[in-house]
């Protein structure tokens, strides 16, 4: 950097489109009731969600260049949730497709970036008749934690 003062830029993003919300909104289905769903609070991304992450990486590279920030992306952190790790990986893919000199960049999973990994807490609002969003039955957030 030409600037004698060192600085760090931190960019915080949310995950891409998640499968459970897509199924709920577009397919009138419920991810929570799929027989393969052992962790209903941890759905993967849809194909569109993966593309959103990749496009974000491409956009990030472009914005950094437009703002004359020449330092490369040096770290990508994610919570342990599947959708977040997938988003982070796609951000790296999109960023690296634009620049070939960043092949060593990997996702670092940081457990402190998640609200909770407590099975009981998640199951308290992931009820069988829930609509899959925060809250209980049909989004009723008044349902208590067991």
Image: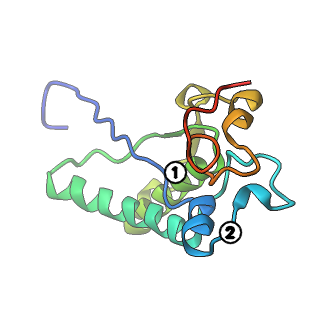
Residue shown at the point (71%, 60%) measured from the top left:
31
Mark 2, residues whose alpha carbon is within 10 Å: few (<14), some, or many (≥20)?
some
Tag in front: 2 or 1: 2
142 lies left or right of 51: right
Residue 130 tag number: none
Placement of 85 over or under 95, stated as above or below? above
Residue 78 is situated, as x and y percent measured from the top left of the image, at 54, 40
100 lies left or right of 120: left
In the rendered image, the residue lying farthest to the right is 35
Residue 86's image quarter? bottom right
Along the viewing direction, whichever of 38 and 47 lies nearer the viewer: 38
Residue shown at the point (38%, 46%) measured from the top left:
73
Residue 21 is situated, as x and y percent measured from the top left of the image, at 57, 60
6 lies left or right of 123: left
Q: Disc 1 marks which residue?
A: 88
The span from disc 2 to disc 1 (Cα, nearest Å) is 27 Å
83 lies left or right of 6: right
Mark 1, residues whose alpha carbon is within 10 Å: few (<14), some, or many (≥20)?
many
Residue 82 is situated, as x and y percent measured from the top left of the image, at 65, 49
Q: Disc 2 marks which residue?
A: 29
Residue 105 is situated, as x and y percent measured from the top left of the image, at 51, 48
Placement of 113 over or under 22, stated as above or below? above
Along the viewing direction, whichever of 89 and 2 lies nearer the viewer: 89
Q: What kind of element bears circle 2?
A: loop
Contact between marks 2 and 1 (CB within 8 A): the answer is: no
Q: Quadrant of the N terminus?
A: top left
Q: Quadrant of the C terminus?
A: top right
């Amino acid at each position: 950097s030409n600037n004698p003062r060192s600085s760090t830029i931190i960019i915080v993003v949310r995950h891409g489109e998640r499968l459970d919300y897509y199924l709920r909104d577009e397919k009138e289905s419920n991810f929570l009731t799929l027989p393969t769903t052992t962790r209903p609070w941890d759905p993967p991304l849809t194909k569109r969600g993966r593309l959103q992450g990749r496009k974000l990486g491409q956009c990030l590279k472009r914005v950094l260049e437009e703002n004359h920030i020449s330092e490369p992306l040096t770290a990508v952190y994610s919570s342990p949730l599947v959708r977040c790790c997938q988003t982070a990986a796609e951000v790296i893919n999109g960023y690296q497709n634009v620049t070939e000199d960043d092949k060593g960049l990997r996702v670092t999973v940081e457990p402190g970036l998640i609200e909770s990994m407590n099975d009981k807490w998640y199951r308290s609002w992931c009820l069988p008749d829930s609509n899959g969003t925060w809250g209980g039955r049909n989004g009723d957030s008044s349902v208590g934690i067991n």
